Image: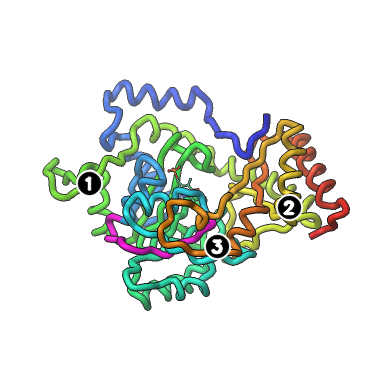
Amino acid sequence: MINVTKTYLPSMEKYKKYLEKIYTNGQITNNGILVQELEAKLKEYLKVKNIILVANGTMALEIAYKALGVNNFAVTTPFSFVATTSSMVFSQINPVFADINPSTLNIDHKTIGNKIIKGTSAIVPVHIFGNACEIENIEKIAKKNNLKLIFDGSHCFGIKYKNKNILSYGDITTISFHATKIFHTIEGGAIVTNNSKLDKKIREMVNFGLNEYYEIKNIGINAKMNEFEAAMGLCMLEEIDNIIKKRSEIWYRYEKELKNFVVFQKRNPNSTNNYSYFPIILQNEQQLLKTIKTLNKEKIYPRRYFYPSLDTLNYIKYKQYCPVSREISKKILCLPLYSELKADRQQKIISIIQDITNQKTGKP
Ligand SMILES: *Cc1c(COP(=O)(O)O)cnc(C)c1O
């Protein structure tokens, strides 16, 4: 069975070395030595100023909203994983959707201005599939309207934008280290900020609002990463360059073989790629469903990332109609992509897509 992704597991031997450390030390959570080690190593690897490890990418977003005082309304993209939006609604913030650019699949900066209303407190774009948004344009809009800027960088491990790590933009950028992401800690995530005061505030917020002397200072929550998760992250970090390299080979094979058959996401020329996802845009939903059905017969299971468009969710109070996102959601598919994907299986996937897209309906 071939799924859209397969969680990379480092060798058990490697993981065991860290487990032994945990058992010797006896501390399994509460900012233990492995969490501290992973934090320090990620800070250096990613070259970011402040990074706070947390329990998952959704909590990272919720804490970012709280720490920056985001409330009432926030402008965001309808084309993302549901957590970008659900984390807002869960935090009593109303998402206001601004439609996406049909080529880059990111929030279209030209649509943001119209969505800023009385009570808007933030813009929350997503660098979708690790493709950088129009960062400077969005920064300008945020500054002009006095809005907080939080990037959901969940797909962006290792990505650089104009030679700087992409996580270092905005007031905060969050990232997910979930098992399905390219760099994972089983469950996990992080909050990145250049503002050291904010960093201190967030560190307390993640730990019930306790300060370094365990005094109750402010309201907080429990969003701590534990030692077993950090151990996984330390193992992954040793191998991540290799994983990305292997995935890039698969990514480029897809690109070469499918470029005359389907439409690809247009990538930002100032942004590097971590080869996390290979989305293809088909002609219409019918063709997409046919592709899925044919692949399923071969026990190949691509995923409809991201479907449905989030502006269609029933729990959205402030309704916005985003036709571009709705249209793209209906015909976009992410192909299986992971370092251990076998060449013959990838060829099968390629052949099926070439066949279907080349039939009477014609090329896109
Ligand atoms: C995965 C993901 C999240 C949520 O991360 P979790 O670690 O699973 O909570 C948020 N936003 C986007 C865009 C994601 O892909």
Give, as a three-letter code, the residue at label 2: Glu
Q: Which residue is mark 3?
A: 106
Q: In the drawing, what numbered circle is on residue 255?
A: 2
Q: Point out the tag, 3 or 1, that comes first from the N-terminus.
A: 3
Q: Secondary structure at mark 3?
A: loop
Q: In the drawing, what numbered circle is on residue 220?
A: 1
> Residue 244: x percent and y percent?
59, 45
Question: Spatial distance from mark 3 to mark 2, Cα to Cα?
Answer: 20 Å
Graded by Cα atoms within 10 Å as few (under 14), some (14 to 19) or many (20 or more), the crowding at tag 3 reads many
Q: Point out the tag, 3 or 2, that comes first from the N-terminus.
A: 3
> Residue 153: x percent and y percent?
46, 54
Graded by Cα atoms within 10 Å as few (under 14), some (14 to 19) or many (20 or more), the crowding at tag 2 reads some
Residue 68 falls inside the magenta stretch: yes
What's the magenta region?
66-79
Q: Residue at x 67, y 44 (%)?
A: 335
Q: Residue at x 63, y 64 (%)?
A: 102
Q: Residue at x 58, y 58 (%)?
A: 272
Which of the two discs, 3 and 2, sits closer to the camera?
3
Q: Point out the tag, 2 or 1, that comes first from the N-terminus.
A: 1
Question: Spatial distance from mark 3 to mark 1, Cα to Cα?
Answer: 32 Å
Q: Secondary structure at mark 1?
A: loop
Q: Secondary structure at mark 2?
A: helix
